[in-house]
Image (spheres, helix red, strand yellow):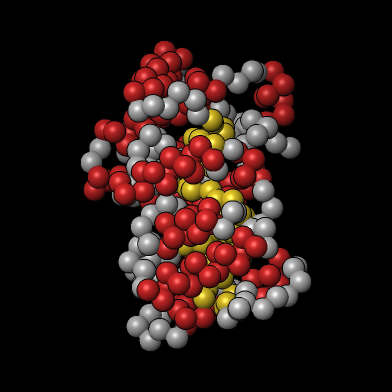
Amino acid sequence: MSPWPELLANKPVDTRIEMGAYEYLWQQPKSSTKRLAELFQANPGSLPSDLVDSDSAQRAADEVVQYFSKRGIERFGLRINGTHDYPARLRDAVEPIELLYFLGSWELAEAPRRVAVVGTRKVSDEGAARTRKLVRALVERDFTIVSGLAQGVDTIAHQTAIEAGGRTIAVIGTPISEVYPKENAMLQRRIASEFLLVSQVPLLRYKSQGAHVNRFFFPERNKTMSALSEATIIIEAGETSGTLTQARAALDQGRKLFILESNFQNPSITWPAKFEQRGAIRVREIDDILREFKSTPQEFA
């Protein structure tokens, strides 16, 4: 039996202290997503505050809140493993995270038909057109579009969803107070205020190290994006694209993975066939996606 019901019945959860404790754990030498996942696996039923002294947690929390305030963020939300509103599907990840930050409407994370639309940052003209066409078709069928707010496919997916009057969720690879790429500042603000912006990136750790190290947060967020979604759709990706991290995660987590047919026709890459062998689904028309969601087939015109 899970230890959480008994824990929560006897211990009120102070979200600020839990945030500070989690941030403090991330500040420790050699901390990583993998190491923290192992730490919590070794301490089942523990909240971050069970592993950190209260003074250290409070100082870290104060620093985070003060920094967010300077960046114009006065109110933000948290989802903490062990509380009733933490999404259980995140535990499908191989190395699940204990805490998420968010801005906007968390209700979107519970919306039906959440699909991640992802792909290369250096998208081709054809790939951009396919992204717009597919996202418009999905929005028309009441899908919520999830992506990572990166250049290329991600940006087009978010923009198209909004332009089509749909819903969108951005899972970013920086803290909620930071913007990357910088040209997406306005888009990020709009998503945070009108839709949903999610981040698992610990602020204090991020601030304390350089960009060359912080880049490792991006593939980690892809795993979380997959876990939050019901399926992932790959528009276009190269042989070494970070998008393939999400493809692997989707299959590992028992999520559906869709790959556009154009990738299979690209002789310069071999990954589509490899993922198809593992259960990925080719997408020649939107019916190939709708069928998996038990929808009435419709032509992808």
Quarter that holds the N terminus: top right
| Front residue of this view, candidates 284 and 246 | 284
Residue at 53% across, 53% down: 162
Q: In the image, is 141 to the left or to the right of 149?
A: right
Q: Name the quadrant containing residue 4.
A: top right
Q: Which quadrant would residue 2 be assigned to in this image?
A: top right
Please determine whether, in this image, residue 161 is positioned above or below residue 67: below
Q: As drawn, is 55 to the left or to the right of 255?
A: left
**Residue at 45%, 29% in the rendered image:** 22
Image position, residue 197 (x, y; %): 49, 42
Whole-percent x and y of residue 36?
A: 45, 38
Q: Is residue 248 visible?
A: no
Q: How many marks?
A: 0
**In front here: 177 or 270?**
177
How far from the left and from the top, in percent, is residue 232? 55, 62
* Nearer to us in this view, 155 or 226: 155
The residue at 61%/60% (across/down) is 139
